[in-house]
Amino acid sequence: MNRLKNSASRPRPILEGLKGDSALSDSLARLIKAQEKDSRGGAKLSAKAQASRRKTLIRLKTGLEALARQDYATASTRLQQALELDDSNALAWRMLAVAFDKQGEFAKAFTAYEAAARLAPNDLSVVREVGQLAYRLGKLEIAERLFKRFLAGEPGNEEVADSLACVFRDQNRYDEAFALLRDSINGNPEHPGLWNTLGTVLSENGDVAGAMVYYDEALRLDPGFHKARHNRAYCLTVLGESERALQDMDLASQGLTDPRQIASIRLAKAFTQLLTGDLVAGFESYEARFDAALEGAFVFTEFGRRWDLGDDLRGKSLLIYGEQGLGDEVLFANIISDTLDALGPDGRLIIAVERRLVTLFQRSFPQAKVLPHKTVRQFNTLFRTVDLGDQPAPIDVWTPMASLFRRFRTSLAAFPRDPGFLVPDPQRVAHWRQVLEDSGPGPYVGVLWKSMKMGGSRQRHYSPFTLWSPVLETPGVRFVNLQYANAEEDLAAARARGFDIWTPPGIDLKMDLDELAALCCALDTIMGPSTATTNIAAAVGARVFVSAGPGSWTGFGSDQAPCYPSARIFHAAQFDQWEQVMRQMAEALSEELLSDHTSGSRPDAA
């Protein structure tokens, strides 16, 4: 049992298409057979061995009964007691894995499944279950190997073929996923899950309109297939049919029972409401992001009472937590000036943000105290806290930053028109302007083209770097590299095509965010997708051209970015249609930036 101790857990959400839980009734039947077999052969054992076996079987049976009534804590205790007597019992290991899985202890569950698989290497049902949990843990290579092993023994199993297709999809191996699902559908065209997963493959590869055909077919086969209805709702949102999308979400949420899927739909509904400009309902629905059933939901250390929409902030001591990713912390900081006004001269504001943002935020909001927050993951939950040190007075109320949008951003008219709300160091802006001038003649255009995380569906939000040619061919421009991760291969390919993208010296583009803010202000324009860098650039009021896919909820009912007046958004009609976006950005660069440079004008956000 020592193998179960000190297991770290990094769970992964179940994506569309994966099936399966252990069949408890089947396990109980197997247990009864095992008891009967043991009783027949018991005469060959010593009295002590017979007593130990009976004790093991009793504990195993009580563990299975606890599983059947969903008492997973008791089940795991009884099953571990059974394994202390006999750790060669594959069924006990398998059921222990189920009990751990249900409690969110995924690493322990995986260890138990592995033990079951070693003890019963020819039991394909165990192979399938280990593969399913490996997938949930993000161990895609292990999951692929196990699913292929299962299919070698049962080549016609649609559910495992479906699961293997999900693995291919999440590795961006879309052609393999499509081929596998096509063959499975040819063998069983009445299986709605296969059609649903095929829709997810097309959707994640950028063909949202094409995915609709497969979701529709899944729902024709099974009108109660609410997962497919949820997936179709996402596509409808992207395609601009928000009313139909909201109807599908409501129907799906009424029919689902899995808390994770219900929470996911609630959050999707919030994004759709915000996309359509229904900010009051949208930001209220957005509170669903804290649902404990969601993968990666934050739990905050509470200081004082949590702020509520009806609370008067005047004269209060308020702690604001930055939340979600770094780009989100910058985006939602659009609200801080309004919050300071609401607190008044007698109020006190403490802001907890990502450590790399502390200096920039402290300069931008000198009336507040800015501290770094700390985040740790335990199982399926992210815990965020802050060390307040010695405070002159207790905190009255605290809130996640985006929750304040419910008070201050109830319509587009409520967004400020000022070009920026973060303040870079003016001396460093001057420094970078000199560095740029020393590097060669301008105008100077910063470019970046991807995020650090490009796996799965994320990559559809980014134009392939190979399509940047119209921008990079613009004559007379000094292009500056702002790509903060994995850029060398792309830069080498650009050089091979005759494009010179200069990398500024003496700055870590990922870690030195205060320096990055100053560099962005020194540039004439920044071009790229929505990343932490483009968010910072827009927040300091630099001119930013942002490439975006369809259905961007941060437009809040507009086709631009209300939080960032200095940004201009270029939308793709669909995720697989980036060529037109890059041509439009190139034209804007020629028409606006070069005309500014010729006339001697230059944006000055510092």
Image: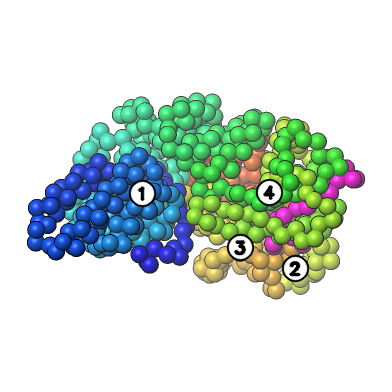
Q: Which residues are magenta?
A: 341-360
Q: Which mark is residue 483?
A: 3
Q: Which mark is residue 436?
A: 2
Q: Position of residue 56 (x, y in %)?
A: 25, 56
Q: Residues within 10 Å of mark 3 (few under 14, many from 20)?
A: many
- Secondary structure state at the residue bearing disc 1: helix
**How many callouts does the rendering have?**
4
Residue 563 in magenta? no
Badges 3 and 4: C-beta atoms under 8 Å apart? no
Amino acid under label 3? Gln
Amino acid under label 4? Glu
N-term-proximal mark, 3 vs 4: 4
Distance between the Cα atoms at labels 2 and 1? 66 Å
Residue linked to disc 4: 302
Q: Residue at x 75, y 49 (%)?
A: 319
Distance between the Cα atoms at labels 4 and 1? 33 Å
Residue linked to disc 1: 75
Q: Quadrant of residue 550?
A: top right
Callout in the foreground (4, 1): 1
The answer to whether residue 134 of the structure is visible from this angle is: no
Q: Which mark is residue 316?
A: none
